[in-house]
Amino acid sequence: MAEKMVDKVTRLMKNPQNIRNIAICAHIDHGKTTFSDNLLAGAGMMSKEDAGKALKLDFHADEQERGITIDTAAVSMVHSLKGNEYLINLLDTPGHVDFGGDVTRAMRAADGAIVLVDAVESIMPQTETVLRQALRELVKPVLFINKVDRLIKELQLTPEQMQERFIKIITSVNRLIMDIAPKGYGEKWQVNVQNGSVCFGSAFHNWALSIPYMQSKKITFKDIIEAYNTDNYKSLSDRAPLHEVVLNMVVDHLPSPKIAQPYRIPKIWHGDIESEDGKSLVASDSNGPLYFIITKIVIDPQAGEISAGRLFSGTMKKGIDVYLNRLKQNTKVQQVFIYNGAKREIVDNVPSGNFIGVAGVKAYAGETITLQPAETPFEQITHIFEPVITKAIEAKKPSDLPKLIEVLRMVGKEDPTVKIEINEETGEHLMHGMGELHLEVIENRIKTEKGVEVQTSNPIVVYRESITKPSQEAMGKTPNKHNLFFFRVDPLEDSIYEAIKKGEISEGRIKKKDLELRDKLVECGMESKDALKVKAIYKGNILMDMTRGQVHLGEVLELILDMFEDVMSQGPLAREPCFKVKVMLTDMKLHEDAIHRGPAQVYPAVREGIRGAMMTSRPILFEPYQILRIEAPSDFLGEISKLISNKRGQLLDAQQEGVLSIIKAKLPVGEMFGWSSDLRSATGGRGSSSLIDQMFEKLPEELQDKIVKQIRNRKGLTEAQVGV
């Protein structure tokens, strides 16, 4: 009797040398999900007729309706090459920039990535973003150039012109890898046609080619063009099946956990590599201590919360007691799953190096699960773009309120890039998201999948607060008048802020002397002795302890850090998040008796001290800007530039490619509501735009007071409450 797929997968999971954990990533509409469907069909998991139409990995109704991938989907399949069987754990990720957070989290679980590029459109802004996300997590890329059929049928290129176009795409991808990859990997990870780390083909027609495959099967470009010219292209999927060519490339060029973990672990886990935990993580040892990181949470109506992620060390067994390091609590694993598209198969245990799901654990994406409390959990997963748009949401029926709060908490878990803020005091519920589409999808899912009728406000922009000059010293006094805290604040140097943003300096609280961090800060221009005084880095702000000879500092430091984070999340001007602020604790006078310096005393004093110092350093608001790439026929260039200037935007660049104009523009998010419909009406429905980058810039002076007042009114803040 033929071996069942689940038994095959279970057998192969035990051999980490033959496992490949990979993600597929690309710009929106470049054909990722059709591509993954064909890989599944090739692995015998769905019928070939359905491939590309069934969209097996888009299993939410709204994904099929909109024709875009919103959630990362996982599947395990088996591939044979040269008499060996390999287990391929595949993640299909979204391409729309609003769901980029899903790509970042998938990269933590993968060791390799297939970067998909459309042969006609070539490199697009989101291709660059997903490549940046992959390389930041030290995930090795290979390249698949899709939609080659369009070059033959629509553009009618000759073999020579096709090769020229391929060379151009490959050169651009290699240049990006060179620019973005961490030191030492740019040269090593270049993709190359000759060695087979580049494939080209058509996911829609289910064929692919690489130079090694063409040589072994004696197929040439001319054969491909001939097949299309004689309408015989269906035969290509038998001569050069997509799954075979692509999975051969994956096996040959992407690393197994045994090869990838030695260089990936030091990047994503900052513990001692020489410790027992460190050695086990580097070796992907299934007999070592358990280390499992959650990258995705799916709420299943029957099974409840399923936490999917990557097992980096140890063996996950059902029924074991585990510890959640970020939530600091114990829990039990009730079931362990392996993936099979939308289906999950229950298994008893899984060794390290695999992508799995567990049930019974109530946690968040980014959580590190171990058996005992770990000294160092995995580095937090940081997203490239931050949420810049907010909507207030409320239940239509007051009786649905408890259900709505429950649903919002679930939504926040399923998609960590949506920040959910539930204010128990004012009863206001806020959803912060990446863009209008992002929030629209979440709202739609709350109504259809979670069954709660809700109404939402118009979108609100999230601003940032910062300071413009060094402050005076400010004092915070505890309510019992027994303790004093003195603070100064300075604007944070650009070089340090950029390094934090790029992930070169990792965020978090600094427990012990961190010489690596000191060297990084010195490299960015900080004095060596000052660099050792940094106690916390939080959302692009830092706290430094400049005090001397404080005996009780250790007892109150955690409390000071709590309030530093609190003020940085809600600044003094309008309770918006702060960035680029350097807070210095300059002195403190503490009561001898610990009972007089508990949280109830220290919290208000520290908050008052930091906010007081910031109010003397001319605080201002920064607004979010997005850089967009706009494509439209050249006749509409005038209309588009008018639209951009009406929205306080700047036209950065305009180039002509054939009949198309490609425009780069910078627009304030506050003016961008309804942007896609405005662009459509300005271009007769023929314009499209995609996000390249996002940043914060100073809000013009003449708008500062007006916007601050608007935010305060919206939040119900009185003059007395602000700045304290």
Image (spheres, rainbow, N blue to C red):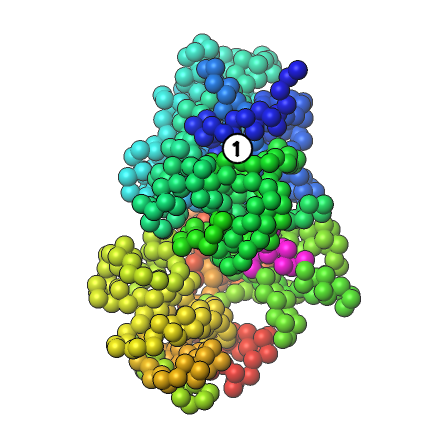
Q: Is residue 407 left or right of residue 420?
A: right
At a point 45% along the width and 9% down the height, the residue shown is 218
Quarter assignment of residue 92: top right
Task: Name the residue nearer the viewer: 647 or 24.
Answer: 24
Residue 654 visible in the picture: yes
Q: Is residue 648 left or right of residue 444?
A: left
Tell me residue 253's x, y (percent): 40, 27
Which region shows up in magenta?
Answer: 407-419
Report the residue that reaches farthest toward the top: 218
At a point 49% along the width and 12% down the height, the residue shown is 223
| Above or below 717: residue 410 | above
Report the residue that reaches farthest toward the bottom: 481
Tell me which secondary structure the magenta stretch mostly adopts: helix
Element type where label 1 sits in the image? strand
Tell me residue 186's x, y (percent): 31, 38
Q: In the image, what residue type sits under mark 1?
A: Asn
At a point 36% along the width and 84% down the height, the residue shown is 592
